[in-house]
Image (cartoon, grey):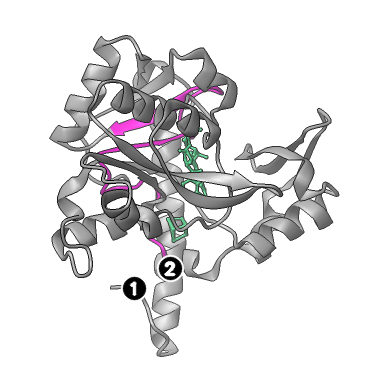
Amino acid sequence: MSELGKYIKVVSARSKLKEVLKKSQDGGIVSTAFIYGLENNLLDGVIVADKKDGFMPYPKVATTVEEVLEAAGTKYSVCPNISVLKSAAREYGCEKIGVVGTPCQVRAVRKLIKYPLGFRHVADKIALIIGIFCMENFPYEGLKLIVEEHCNVKMDDVVKLDIGKGKFWVYTRWGETKAIKLKETHPYEQTSCHVCLDYTAELADISTGSVGSPDGWSTVFIRTKKGEEFFNKMVEDGYLEIKPIEEVKPGLDLVIKLAKTKKDKNSKEIEHRKELNLPVPH
Ligand SMILES: Cc1cc2nc3c(=O)[nH]c(=O)nc-3n(C[C@H](O)[C@H](O)[C@H](O)COP(=O)(O)OP(=O)(O)OC[C@H]3O[C@@H](n4cnc5c(N)ncnc54)[C@H](O)[C@@H]3O)c2cc1C
Ligand code: SF4
């Protein structure tokens, strides 16, 4: 099993848009790509995960730069982005849709493009699929327990959540930072994530995550011709700065290591579930 899926090239990159860097999780690749697409008529609507009070994610069709910026940053909870895809095409009348999602959501989009059951006249309007790396996710109630019980912070006071360096980090609007060992969050993971074999969103046009690049930068895989064309234009037009991945630390080796860890661990869980005659993904 390949660890990273197919790709044309991989780089370390960061947005050149100051307003993005103020709000983005890492190098702001997702928000910058969506803003670039909307400003240059390559996209006319993008599906993002915005948040309500209490840092609860909800899926949204964004058609303006302001809406994209509002939805920047990672929400470590399940957000059914694909549920508004049909609405983007039918209610918003979008012809060139951008979608961001976790690896499982990217797989769902590829599946509906190939077998558009219930998605007639929608699949052909998907213009760009951006995937974000994902090791695991939490149901909202689980996230709430981690933040409120373990970190002693009210969900209403959270401004940013992050996972890195073996810890789960919570940043509050009072300027405080709390962290607990990632190990302590394991009981709250969504159980379906334990049979997931995709870490780097292998079926996206472009996929991105923090692992492999320094703080404030992102690791970016350009996977398809469509993704390559879009990415190159963004760089040429001055929206992104890039560095060869070989020149940054910790670099690609760490991405490979984590992808392999996820695939090995979850493959074992799939085998275990098969022995118990429990359902497993196809
Ligand atoms: C559950 C989860 C687990 C992750 N695990 C890892 C990991 O193990 N390693 C790693 O390197 N990176 C991981 N990431 C990705 C990382 O946190 C960043 O999302 C990614 O690097 C993009 O950052 P950015 O600055 O380019 O994006 P930004 O410009 O900040 O934009 C992020 C985009 O992602 C969307 N989004 C936010 N939360 C969700 C969600 N829950 N579901 C769908 N879309 C969402 C936002 O709407 C926004 O458009 C994870 C993300 C999630 C949601
Ligand atoms: S671990 Fe897999 S199934 Fe769980 S949210 Fe991430 S991509 Fe989806």
Sooner in the amino-acid sequence: mark 1 or mark 2: 2
Q: Mark 1 sits on what residue?
A: 281
**Image spot of residue 260 (x, y percent):** 40, 51
Residue 28 circle label: none
- Please report the bounds of the magenta region as a residue range: 195-221
Please, what is the three-letter code of the amino acid marked with disc 1? Pro
Q: Look at mark 2 in the image and give the residue it sits on.
A: 195
Name the image quarter holding the N terminus: bottom left
Residue 47 percent across, percent down from the top left: 39, 44
Q: Is mark 1 within 8 Å of ligand 2?
A: no
State left or right for residue 177 relative to residue 193.
Answer: right
Q: Tell me the residue at 55%/41% (across/down).
A: 74
Q: Residues within 10 Å of mark 2 (few under 14, many from 20)?
A: some
The local crowd at label 1, few if under 14, some if 14 to 19, many if 20 or more residues have their Cα within 10 Å, is few
Residue 73: image quadrant is: top right
Under circle 1, the secondary element is loop
Q: Residue at x 35, y 27 (%)?
A: 33
